[in-house]
Amino acid sequence: MNSNLKVRPIAFILSISLMLTIGCKSIQNSAMAQTSGNPVFEGWYADPEGVVFGKEYWIYPTFSAKYTDQVFLDAFSSKDLVNWEKHSRVLDTSIVKWAKQAIWAPAAIEKDGKYYLFFSANDVQRPGGPMWDTENDINHYGGIGIAVAESPSGPFRDYLEKPLVSDFYNDAQPIDQFVFKDVDGTHYFFYGGWGHCNMGILNDDFTGFIPFEDGEIFKEITPEGYVEGPLMFLRNNTYYLMWSEGGWTNDTYKVAYAMGNSPRGPFKRIGTILEADRSIATGAGHNSVIQVPGTDDWYMIYHRRPIPNLDRDHRVVCIDKMEFNADGTIKNIIMTFDGVQPQPILNPKK
């Protein structure tokens, strides 16, 4: 028999084996390289509230459109930060009768088996102010409301059937609320637009506030540079306050932060950690922060303006890694198109 006839089958088998090996490695590498991508889901959204409920991540964003079209809130859930499921209209003006427009900047928290969704509505202004709609008279009433549900996906109902905060305290516009649960069980309430940040303490059933020792309902804690969008988180016994600076309609928008020993402050501005990168996006801000339970892995969820930007309301939701220096200060957030790798929750909070 010709020796070449013996060699060829062997070479063929080796070739097929090599191709299969390379193919399997390529599939493995592809799976390992899978990321969320940025933006993490389709559509124009902003002001994302990221939160962990059990073994799922949730994002509650603002629907980014004209104020008169902002009449509902969608939600998105994921088990790994990569694959997201949309939950349409978890809240809208058919549920919240006093809300007419500008439903935005939701904040979510679980308490005693119920899920509370705080939101701003109507872009409330002082009478006669520059945004006052005298023809429709729709800016005379509004503020911060609460919805409640048995599940993170709803159905939500209007908890108070009126705003929780509708007046102006310390000249802070009643928008952009955030609820922070401290280690002792106290629920701190941060909010404020127009360059003023207030802090209050929610009562046990979230129907109002516990006055401070001097009888005041809210204390102003405005740090240098503050514009809007406050949030707080705790890491290694240090309280971090974050907020947005600049103008939300342009590329001056950015995120700054402070550190403190108490949720009550004082808070001194440390610096900016997220801002425009013209090779990727502009107008990066109004963020939230999530920690993977049982780990020291942290992520920033934020909105940004794609390049080219198509409209005042062209904003999208993105996720990128948040890391810390040895002294606890936060490293600058690097915006990416890749987003983050899969991160399932293995040790959910109880």
Image (spheres, rainbow, N blue to C red):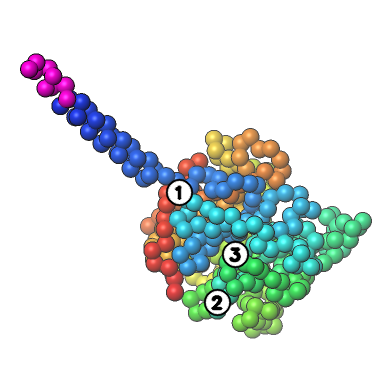
Q: How packed is label 3: few (under 14 Cα within 10 Å), some, or many (20 or more)? A: many
Point out the tag, 2 or 3, that comes first from the N-terminus: 2
Residue 7 in magenta stretch:
yes
Which residue type does callout 3 highlight?
Answer: Ser
* Residue depth check, mark 2 versus mark 3: number of the one nearer the observer: 3
Residue 139 in magenta stretch:
no
Please tell me which residue is depicted at 77% across the width and 70% down the height of the picture: 166
Which residue type does callout 2 highlight?
Answer: Gly
Q: Is residue 327 visible?
A: no
How far across and how far down the image is residue 151, in percent? 58, 69
Q: Image height check: is 76 above or below 32?
A: below
| Circle on res. 340 | 1
Q: Which residue is mark 3?
A: 153
Q: How packed is label 2: few (under 14 Cα within 10 Å), some, or many (20 or more)? A: few
Q: Which residues are magenta?
A: 1-9
Q: Quadrant of residue 198?
A: bottom right
Pick whichever, 136 or 221, lies toward us: 136
Q: Main secondary structure of the magenta part?
A: helix
Which residue type does callout 1 highlight?
Answer: Val
Pick whichever, 182 or 27, lies toward us: 27
Q: Quadrant of residue 34?
A: top left
